Image: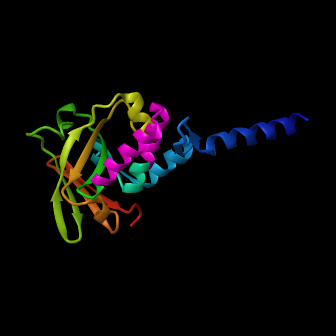
Amino acid sequence: MARLLFVTFAIAVAGCTAAPLKNSSGVEAMSPSSYASLISKHTVKTNQYSGFYQTFQADVTILSSDLQTEILKQRAQFSQWDQSAYQSERDKVMQESGAYSKFFLRFFSPENEYNDLNKAKTIWKVYLDYGGTRFEGKVRKVDEKYVELRTVYPHVDNFSTPYEVTFNVPMTTVEGGQSKVTLTSSLGSAEFSFPVGK
């Protein structure tokens, strides 16, 4: 009997974690576990060392049109947007995707002075290679509250800095083929290829 109750409880818990979430306006978001898995599938990570010394750590997430839609659904869930607010935000995202491409960058360096990708005199450059052309990125620091940022990007932690990088090429173009983001400086370089695994 105890075993039967345990199995029933386990099935109920599994169903809760996998079931999509719906707010009162009917905007349906993925379950936290499914959403975290989706973010992971769009993210490439690196951990760079010079000998035994860690120089920097970075994760780059390609913000494809589909992923940005799922991100909006998560925001609609915790902000309790109505259908009109959600649709307005989605229209904005689709318009932006037709103008430029966007990536989320989580960055950490043990030396805080190197964690300045958004500054004018930073040592870092970020490039996107697509279709035989190289585009230089514009980096801005994401100022969102940690609790909200962590809901949208589950891999973010308190020790790293969140950035958003934009390139002057439409996401609707980039997401249709292979691309590569390069993060480079005198401290070291890393490459992130998309789609993930290609």
Residue 162 can be seen in this image:
yes
Q: Which is nearer the eye, 81 or 156?
A: 81
- Could you say where residue 79 lies in the image, as x and y percent from the top left? 44, 31
Picture quarter with the C terminus: bottom left
Residue 127 place in picture, x, y as percent? 19, 56
In the rendered image of this protein, does residue 91 appear above or below residue 196?
above
Return the residue found at the far front: 84
Is 4 covered by the magenta stretch?
A: no
In percent of width and height, residue 161 lies at: 29, 35
Residue 185 shown left or right of residue 154 in the figure? left
Task: Give the extent of the magenta segment.
Answer: 70-95
Q: Would residue 60 be visible to someone looking at this image? A: no
Residue 22, by quadrant, is: top right
Residue 178 appears left or right of 168: right
Q: Furthest residue to the right? A: 1
Residue at the farthest bottom position: 132
Residue at image coords 23%, 55%: 100
From this view, report whether residue 60 is shown above or below residue 80: below
x and y, in percent, of residue 145 in the image: 35, 28
User: What residue is rendered at 28% in x and 47% in y?
Assistant: 49
Image quarter for residue 64?
bottom left
Colouring scheme applied when the structure was drawn: rainbow
Camera-side residue of 113 and 10: 10
